Amino acid sequence: MHIVFAASECAPWAKTGGLADVVSALPKTLVKMGHKVQVYLPYYRQVAKMVPTPPVVLPSVTVPFPYYNRFARILDGGVTDGVQMYFVDVPELFDRESFYATPSGDYPDNAERFGTLCRAILEASKIIGIPDVYHVHDWQTAMLAAMLRSIYYFDPVLRHVPSLLTIHNAGYQGWFPPRTIETLLMPWDMFTLDKLEQYDKLNFLKGGIVYADAITTVSRTYAQEIQTPEFGNGLEDVLKKRAGDLFGILNGADYSEWNPATDPHIAAHYTAKKLDGKKECRRDLLHAFRFENVSDNTAVLGLVSRFATQKGIDFITSIMDRLVQEDIVLVMLGNGEEYYERLLTEMAERYPDKVRVQVRFDNVVAHKIEAGADIFLMPSRYEPGGLNQIYSLKYGTIPVVRATGGLQDSIDERPDGGGTGFKFWGYDPEDFFDAIRRALTIFRDKKIWKAMMQRAMEEDFSWQKPAQEYVQVYERIVKNRT
Ligand code: ADP
């Protein structure tokens, strides 16, 4: 099968979160299974820094707007692990400091930026190769699915091509003023509640939900959760309507990137059978955060996260005063909302012997934390799939998670340390603190803890099984359109 991935992120070129990891790992696995995959990604400034002079595949693809045209160049990003990358180059839209926003808010022309991306991908693929399926991701490319079934309806080469939308996070939907529909040259009769309108705004994600042939989300639990008001963010009804075409497929982990036996970013390698190297990684991590003389009995707690309310960062700040009374040190890496960046920095200043934070995006430090910490914290308010807890399992870094979405599906708590981690259910920081204390109690029993680490490390969340599930969905939507 031939699949075109249309996405706004793909590791290592452009990444802010799990979306990038999925768009990087799933195509590789599909190629190994014998499929042909092409990934289209914006040629952001950051991508241009990594690949300064890629060959030009198509010098000019026209994307019309009401009073002008934009022109996209399609660049050859090369073939990595059998996956063909294409970059969509529209300098006035993508040659910017960030992908989506500045500290003062989203780029005001995001609808035009990602609307252009969708149309350029459709036009380019008509020349380069029409796939059997377009696989679109999150709001940024969801409108490709809506365009296919509306303004491209009569296109003889596209009208039978189905699309799959994967929702990596229903909290980000791409809301734009109603007039955007005109800007994108789409008909006003699509601006109704059963199509693209949501609370008098044009909603890109909703466009994908309504028009894609099928929808997946990144865990089974989240597929259920988003059909409720608490998690659907206003889209629960439209999602419920599509329940028959909505599937939860838990994210896999790319073990060629995240494996303590081979990871080039960590101080020493280790496996479930030979754990010694983890001690070296712990020392290296403590050194990287400038901690000295931390006893082996002290639990090293780690956090790698976007600093956002979604991630339950406020749970951490609200228990901090009591957490530091325990025999722990806490190392955190992340960036995002300025409020949390400042609050966590203040806490690190208040408890310099116990708490350290690095406010930035740093892949190497993320690997060091996964390898060097004893316990990984992930108290998300909601978590569609979540990757860090799956990485943590592989590194024998026991996760403490809130039982939601992919965290619920991937972590197993049993009494007395019999599972692979610790979970809490409530929205309450107290419940989180209790779960950490349960973890610390087991941590003190070295034998049970070691068994728990080994059990966690032996869990298999590789991409093979999820990739097969995606193929089943591709096959289903191809069949339904023929
Ligand atoms: P989300 O996509 O909601 O941010 P996930 O757990 O699905 O959350 O994926 C997060 C990914 O981003 C992981 O690969 C994680 O290691 C990485 N990550 C998040 N914040 C940082 C950071 N500050 N530095 C390096 N990597 C980060």
Image (tube, grey):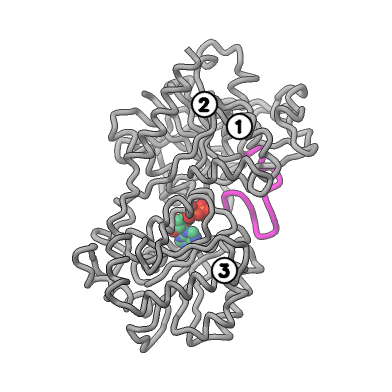
397 left or right of 360 in image: left
Specify the segment rendered in magenta.
Answer: 98-113
Q: State the SS at label 2.
A: strand
Q: Which residue is drawn at 43% across and 35% down?
A: 39
Residue at image mark 1: 208
Q: Is residue 15 visible?
A: no
Q: In which quarter of the image is residue 10?
A: top left
Question: Which of disc 3 and disc 1 is earlier in sequence?
Answer: 1
Percent x, y of residue 322:
56, 82
> Eyeballing the image, is 29 above or below 409?
above
Q: Which mark is residue 163?
A: 2
Distance from Cα at disc 2 to Cα at disc 3: 41 Å
Q: State the SS at label 3.
A: helix
> Eyeballing the image, is 189 above or below 41?
above
Q: Which of 14 and 1 is in front in this view?
A: 1
Q: Quadrant of residue 296?
A: bottom left
| Tag 1–tag 3 contact (CB < 8 Å) | no
Q: Which mark is residue 431?
A: 3
Percent x, y of residue 413:
42, 61
Q: Nearer the viewer, residue 126 or 215?
A: 215
Label 3 CB, ligand 1: below 8 Å?
no
Distance from Cα at disc 2 to Cα at disc 1: 9 Å
Neighbours of disc 1 within 10 Å: few (<14), some (14-19), many (20+): many
Percent x, y of residue 178:
78, 34
Distance from Cα at disc 1 to Cα at disc 3: 37 Å
> In the rendered structure, which amino acid carries the disc numbered 3?
Asp
| Tag 2–tag 1 contact (CB < 8 Å) | yes
Label 2 CB, ligand 1: below 8 Å?
no
